[in-house]
Amino acid sequence: MTMNTQQKDFEASAIRTLREDLALALRAAAYHGLSEGVCNHFSVEIQDESGRFLLNPRGLLWSEIQADDIVMINAQGQILAGRHPVETTAMYIHAAVHRITKKTCVLHTHMPYATALTLTRQRALDTTLSQNAMRFHGRVAVDAHYNGLALDAGEGERIAHAMQGADVVFLGNHGVVVCGDRVDYAYDDLYFLERACMMQVLAMSSGLPLEPVDAKLAQRVGEQTLGERLQSELFFKALGRTL
């Protein structure tokens, strides 16, 4: 076997793993109630400076998506591999976020509790409330300007610039985008973001005054949580075993 053949085999194996991880994240999101019909999109960039990334196809429920359903496209929206079409808004949002923010994994959902907070005056999660919320302290941006569906490259770029390097952006009157360096880390953040938003919405619905902690404590708890990501890896592996 030549070195060139070995390299191609290695690349193919790496891409296959990314396909499997992305498909698992989509099925997990459906299992956890984070999906919405056949809408919303998850993507992961192939780390070879080609600008290619993997994206879930149009028209499939997240609960049914397998690795072979994942589509590979380039930054121009051309399908390079896959048997399904992709949604236009997905291409514009994810291509821009990958290119502008340099994030590897990009997860966009309209998950209920996080989206509910985008409808409020505050627009986003208060990261000084629950322990789950504190893991996002200093990692959240807000795009308060809702501008309709992302049906052109300009809107995707506007969203990407609004992130200002943050891992999480709350899109006013719309939903959220969660980014990470790896699929398992990004999915762990997505899951716990929704849990934190759920706790805040439930607390707000009680009508009782909320009791945040000091911002410095929230920052310290966030640093402690992200100091090691073994829990994120174990969670994703457990999802792989059960889903």
Image: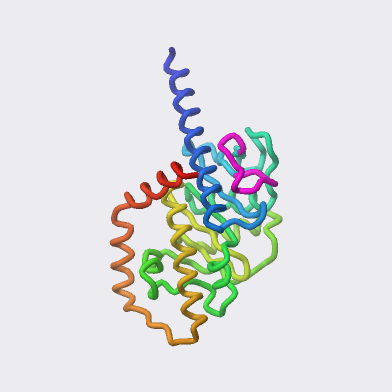
The quarter of the rendered structure image containing the N terminus is: top left
Position of 12 relative to 212 (above/below):
above
Position of 117 relative to 63 (above/below):
below
Q: Where is residue 197 in the image (x, y as percent from the top left)?
A: 48, 69
Of all residues, the one furthest to the front in this rendering is: 242
Q: How is the image coloured?
A: rainbow
Q: Position of residue 188 (x, y in %)?
A: 43, 54
Residue at figure coordinates x 69%, y 55% from the top left: 152
Residue at figure coordinates x 28%, y 61% from the top left: 224
Position of 119 relative to 31 (above/below):
below
The quadrant in which residue 128 appears is: bottom left
Residue at figure coordinates x 34%, y 52% from the top left: 231
Q: In this view, does 129 lie to the left or right of 144?
A: left
Position of 234 relative to 151 (above/below):
above
Quick one: 106 or 191, which is closer to the camera?
A: 191
Looking at the rendered structure, the number of numbered marks drawn on it comes to 0
Q: Is residue 143 magenta?
A: no
Q: Is residue 66 magenta?
A: yes
Q: Is residue 37 left or right of residue 170?
A: right
Q: Position of residue 88 (x, y in %)?
A: 69, 50
Q: Position of residue 42 (x, y in %)?
A: 56, 49
Residue at figure coordinates x 48%, y 58% from the top left: 190
The magenta segment is 56-69
Quick one: 81 or 69, which is closer to the camera?
A: 69
